[in-house]
Image (cartoon, rainbow, N blue to C red):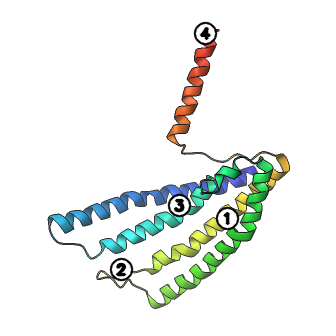
Amino acid sequence: MHRVLLAVDRLNAWIGRIAAWSILALTLVISYEVFARYLFRSPTTWAYDASYMLYGTLFMLGGAYTLSRNGHVRGDFLYRTWSPRRQAWMDLVLYFLFFFPGIAALIWAGYLEASRSWAIGERSNSPGAPILYPFKTLIPIVGCLMLLQGAVEVIRCLDCIRTGRWPQRLKDVEELEQQILREAAAARGEGEDAGR
């Protein structure tokens, strides 16, 4: 079972890493627009649409990745003082009260919106008039990825309730301060061992 949990984490990590490249594309688009607008006094007709689609793609596809890394915001000042079992119970209740109903609504509404967009060949109202239906198709896809990751998180909660420990997660990025603190603690430990 643990392999399945990590496989879903890997899938969402892979998608999150691919989506992260949209930051580079977004930076280039906005930089080009600023350069064209202020240096050549010739703004583009496409940069606005490209930037909101790139940002939307990044934001949506990063959701399941962030959930897989336990990186979403929560009332941590209380949560971190609780035992792992109590944390797991709270997470479990909140997943069923809010997360799954919200994700189900996202998938359903996203499907309806994407279907409508494909049916009419929807385009933006801006001067460049780019097509919107591929972008809107991401909404139900992201909902399904979030639903899959949410199911994995529920299994983690149940495992924690049973064992009293949170199951292992994949880790690929750590906060720099955590790395520095760990290295400092290791250096202190080596220094104390040498002094003995």
Q: CA distance from mark 3 to mark 4?
A: 47 Å
Q: Position of residue 138 (x, y in %)?
A: 52, 73
Residue type highlighted by circle 3: Gly
Labels 4 and 1 touching (C-beta < 8 A): no
Labels 2 and 3 touching (C-beta < 8 A): no
Q: Position of residue 149 (x, y in %)?
A: 66, 61
Residue at point 30% right, 74% down?
46
Which one is in front in this view, the residue at disc 4 or the one at disc 1?
4
Of the numbered discs 3 and 4, the one sitting upstream in the chain is 3
Left or right of 182 on screen, residue 168: right
Q: CA distance from mark 1 to mark 2?
A: 31 Å
Q: Residues within 10 Å of mark 2 (few under 14, many from 20)?
A: some
Residue at point 49% right, 77% down?
136
State the residue position of label 3. Answer: 62
Of the numbered discs 3 and 1, the one sitting upstream in the chain is 3
Q: Residues within 10 Å of mark 3 (few under 14, many from 20)?
A: many
Q: Position of residue 113 (x, y in %)?
A: 54, 84
Q: Residues within 10 Å of mark 1 (few under 14, many from 20)?
A: some
Of the numbered discs 2 and 4, the one sitting upstream in the chain is 2
Which one is in front in this view, the residue at disc 3 or the one at disc 4?
4
Residue that sits furthest to the left in the current view: 40
State the residue position of label 4. Answer: 195
Residue 130 disc label: 2
- Label 3 sits on a secondary structure element that is helix
Residue type highlighted by circle 4: Gly
- Label 1 sits on a secondary structure element that is helix
Left or right of 80 on screen, residue 136: left
Looking at this view, is 145 or 192 the one in front?
192
Q: CA distance from mark 3 to mark 1?
A: 14 Å
Of the numbered discs 2 and 3, the one sitting upstream in the chain is 3
- Label 4 sits on a secondary structure element that is helix
State the residue position of label 1. Answer: 148
